[in-house]
Amino acid sequence: MQITIDIPDDLASRLTPVQDQVPQILELGLREFNVTAEAGLVGLAQVLEVLASLPSPQEVLALRPSENMQRQIDGLLEKSKGEGLSPNEELIWQQYEYIEHLVRMAKARALLKLKATAA
């Protein structure tokens, strides 16, 4: 397939020396774009929004992934046990692990606050 696009002159001059690698450059760029737009970072934004609202300790402890996020996590987990994850999916998985780490830290602190107020 052939695609014709108009690009700024400065970008064209940067692409000229690597013109044989443009398909790979586009592939890598699309992966980055998709990961940023759809995956873990969206989940991270959702978690940070909740935590930025200064929820009560009970609300932090009740924090759960959205249905969509849970489906994505389940799908990646299942695929990792079978055929394995692609490099892009591995990156998404790592982002979900980071989100889980943040939530666990928030829940641990919330639990400590609840225990301190109960004592």
Image (cartoon, rainbow, N blue to C red):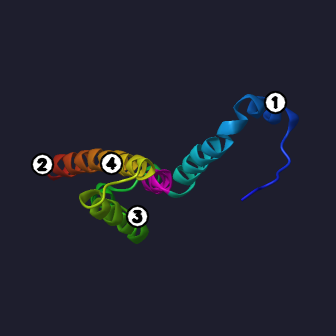
Residue identified by numbered label 3: 69
Quadrant of the rendered image containing residue 25:
top right
Residues marked 2 and 4 touching at CB (< 8 Å): no
Crowding at dot 1, Cα within 10 Å, few <14 / some 14-19 / many 20+, comes out as few
Residue identified by numbered label 4: 97
Compute the Cα span from label 2 to label 4.
Answer: 33 Å
Compute the Cα span from label 1 to label 3.
Answer: 41 Å
What's under tag 3, amino acid-wise?
Met
Q: Which residues are magenta?
A: 39-50
Query: Is there any visible trace of residue 70 in the rendered image?
Result: yes
Residue identified by numbered label 2: 119
Q: Main secondary structure of the magenta part?
A: helix
Front-most of 5 and 19? 19
Q: Which comes before the other along the chain, label 1 or label 2?
A: 1
Q: Where does residue 64 sit, x and y in percent of width and height?
A: 33, 63
Label 4 SS:
helix
Residue identified by numbered label 1: 13
At horizontal 39% and vertical 71% (from top left) the residue drawn is: 67
At horizontal 81% and vertical 35% (from top left) the residue drawn is: 12
